[in-house]
Image (cartoon, rainbow, N blue to C red):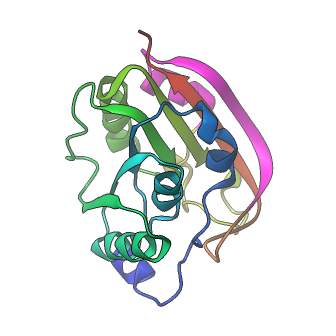
C-alpha cells in the first residue's frame, strides 16, 4: 500500500517537518535519534539538518529511497531502513530520542512497539509523538480510516508506562503537510522522558 502511495514524483506529506516536531526539537536529547514510520523522510532530514545523528525506519522501500534522495538534496545524512516496525529491533538503551509522527499502527502492534520504545531510550531519553485521535475519523483532512488506528493520551499513558510525561494534550490544530495532511485536525501530542 505505502509503496504505491509514495511512488509518485512529489512528496505526499511534503518536505518540511511536522509543526509539533519543529516547535519541540529543543526538547529532544542530542545526539542519536530514531524516527519511526518515517515515510518519505521530511522529519528525519530536518533533524539531521539540526545536527542530530538520525536513523529512520519505514515499511516502504519507496519511502526509504525518497528519504535518501531528500537527505542528499539537503546535504545531510540519514540512515534509513525499510522494515516492519512490528518486528524491527529498536535495541535497548540505544536512542537519545525517538520521534513518532503519525505512526498509526494496529493496536496490537502499537502496544508492542511502544513498550519497546520505553526500553530503547537511554536514561533521560525523550520520546516526541504526534498522532491523530478518534475524533479525526471522517474529517477528510488526513489520518487513518478507522478509530482503532488512532491514539489518545489515556491509551498512550498505558502503552508508554515507565516514561514520565512532560507534555500530553489532545487538541484541534491545522495540519498542512503536503496533500496527505491538509486542514483542521484532531491530534494527540506527547513529550515523555525515560527516568534516570
How many dots with numbers? 0
Q: Nearer the viewer, residue 103 or 81?
A: 81
Q: Where is residue 101 in the image (x, y as percent from the top left)?
A: 53, 50
Q: Is residue 33 shown in magenta? A: no
Q: Nearer the viewer, residue 122 or 155?
A: 122
Residue pictured at 33% horizontal, 77% vertical: 62
Q: Position of residue 156 (x, y in %)?
A: 52, 29
- The answer to whether one can see residue 133 in this image is no
Question: Going by the picture, which residue comes out furthest to the top?
Answer: 196
Quarter location, residue 144 = bottom right
Q: Is residue 159 shown in magenta? A: yes
In the rendered image, the vertical position of residue 79 relative to residue 62, given as above or below: above
Residue pictured at 59% horizontal, 61% vertical: 143
Q: Where is residue 94 in the image (x, y as percent from the top left)?
A: 27, 31
Residue pictured at 54% horizontal, 58% vertical: 46
Q: Position of residue 160 (x, y in %)?
A: 44, 24
Q: In the rendered view of the protein, which quadrant contains the C terminus?
A: top left
Q: Is 149 left, or right, of 154 in this rendering?
A: left
Quarter location, residue 89 = top left
Q: Which of 109 and 148 is in front in this view?
A: 109
Q: Is 126 left, or right, of 15 in this rendering?
A: left
Residue pictured at 21% horizontal, 34% vertical: 91
Q: Is 165 left, or right, of 89 in this rendering?
A: right
Magenta segment:
152-175
Q: Which of 67 and 140 is in front in this view?
A: 67
Q: In the rendered view of the protein, which quadrant contains the N terminus?
A: bottom left
- The answer to whether one can see residue 36 in this image is yes
Amino acid at each position: 500500500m505505502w509503496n504505491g502511495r509514495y511512488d509518485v514524483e512529489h512528496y505526499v506529506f511534503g518536505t518540511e517537518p511536522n509543526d509539533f516536531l519543529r516547535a519541540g526539537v529543543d526538547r529532544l536529547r542530542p545526539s542519536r535519534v530514531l524516527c519511526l514510520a518515517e515515510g518519505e523522510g521530511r522529519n528525519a532530514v530536518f533533524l539531521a539538518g539540526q545536527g542530530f545523528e538520525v536513523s529512520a525506519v519505514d515499511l516502504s522501500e519507496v519511502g526509504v529511497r525518497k528519504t535518501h534522495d531528500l537527505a542528499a538534496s539537503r546535504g545531510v545524512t540519514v540512515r534509513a531502513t525499510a522494515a516492519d516496525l512490528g518486528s524491527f529491533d529498536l535495541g535497548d538503551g540505544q536512542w537519545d530520542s525517538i520521534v513518532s509522527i503519525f505512526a498509526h499502527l494496529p493496536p496490537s502492534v502499537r502496544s508492542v512497539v511502544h513498550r519497546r520504545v520505553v526500553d530503547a531510550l537511554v536514561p533521560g531519553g525523550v520520546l516526541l509523538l504526534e498522532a491523530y485521535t478518534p475524533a479525526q475519523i471522517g474529517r477528510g483532512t488526513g489520518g487513518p480510516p478507522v478509530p482503532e488506528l488512532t491514539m489518545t493520551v489515556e491509551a498512550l499513558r498505558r502503552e508508554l508506562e515507565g516514561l514520565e510525561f512532560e507534555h500530553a494534550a489532545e487538541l484541534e490544530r491545522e495540519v498542512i503537510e503536503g496533500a496527505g495532511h491538509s486542514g483542521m485536525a484532531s491530534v494527540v501530542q506527547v513529550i515523555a522522558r525515560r527516568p534516570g
